[in-house]
Amino acid sequence: MGIKEDLPMDEEINDIQLTKKLTNSLFSLESNEENVMKGIKDLANRMKKSNHEMTNYLSLQNETVRLYIQLVNRKSDIINNQDLMKIKEHVKRMEKTVSVQHEIYNSFQEMGDSYKEYHKTLKDLAKSFEKLNKKQKDWHDSAAELSKAQGSQMTSGQKLDKLEKAVNKQKREVMKYYDDRKHRDGFVQHAMVRINQAWIKLKNVIKTQEW
């Protein structure tokens, strides 16, 4: 293989700028998705705490129902049968709320875990793009230096040989990081599938509830 095959094509040179833009976009996306992940996890934790307290409140209301039954049976002047029916209805609605909320915050917790994996794969992919972009630039710079040396009558054969080896080495590095980028992109795609599944599960949990 001659040195010509090791030189970057025009399209590969153009890809340097595109990779740089993609790298910046990925780091921005990774930062935003991290905020989403934190927000989801925070919401899940807040809902869990609220659900725990609502469960305690429901337990106290059930005690109130039992007390109201006794008062109604004893013909209380303060609590009548209508009051008893109202609090029973209230307790029934709260039981449903506790049950639904429990399912929802579990779904949010699962989604938060999915986002954690997704965020990590995005960050790894962004770093891979960053390394690839650096290697692409090194390759382009080495090729430009070789081209300049080839146009100079002052360049020795030893110098040209050294520059050609540098171009060949940089191309192999670029190929290596292209493979790494494809490998890490596969992890991102897998993580995105899990996120989509978590969103669909949450939607179905909400959709199937009957009030």
Image (cartoon, rainbow, N blue to C red):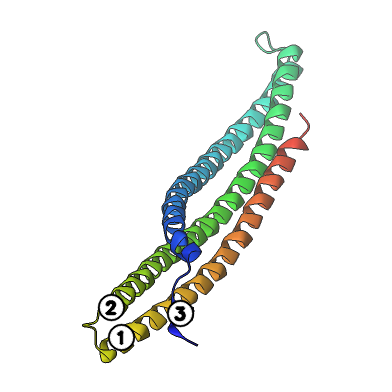
Residue 38 spot, x, y in % from top left: 46, 47
x, y percent for residue 29: 47, 49
Mark 1 packing: few (<14 Cα in 10 Å), some, or many (20+)? some
Disc 2 on helix, strand or loop?
A: helix
Residue drawn at the location 38% of the way across and 79% of the way down:
167
- Label 3 sits on residue: 4
The quarter of the picture where the C terminus appears is top right
Q: Is residue 165 above or below residue 123?
A: below
The residue lying furthest to the left in this view is: 154
- Amino acid carrying mark 2 in the image: Ala
Do the CB atoms of the residues marked 2 and 1 lie less than 8 Å apart? yes
From the viewer's side, name the closer residue of 209 and 155.
155
Residue 36 image label: none
State which tag comes first along the sequence, 2 or 1: 2
Q: Is residue 49 left or right of residue 84?
A: left
Asked whether the beta carbons under mark 3 and mark 2 sit within 8 Å of each other, the answer is no
Task: Name the residue: 31% across, 83% down.
Answer: 163
Would you call the spot at circle 2 few (<14 residues within 10 Å), some (14-19), or many (20 or more)? some
Residue with the most extreme top position: 77
Query: Which residue is located at x 29 percent, y 76 percent?
Result: 151
Q: What element carries label 1?
A: helix
Q: Is residue 100 above or below residue 153?
A: above
Kind of residue at badge 1: Leu
x%, y% of residue 87?
69, 21
Dot 3 or dot 1, earlier in sequence: 3
Task: State left or right for residue 127 relative to residue 53.
Answer: left
**To which residue does mark 1 refer?**
160
Secondary element type, mark 3: helix
* Tag 3: amino acid: Lys
The residue that mark 2 highlights is 149
Whether 55 is drawn above or below 130: the answer is above
User: In x, y percent, where is residue 134?
Assistant: 36, 67
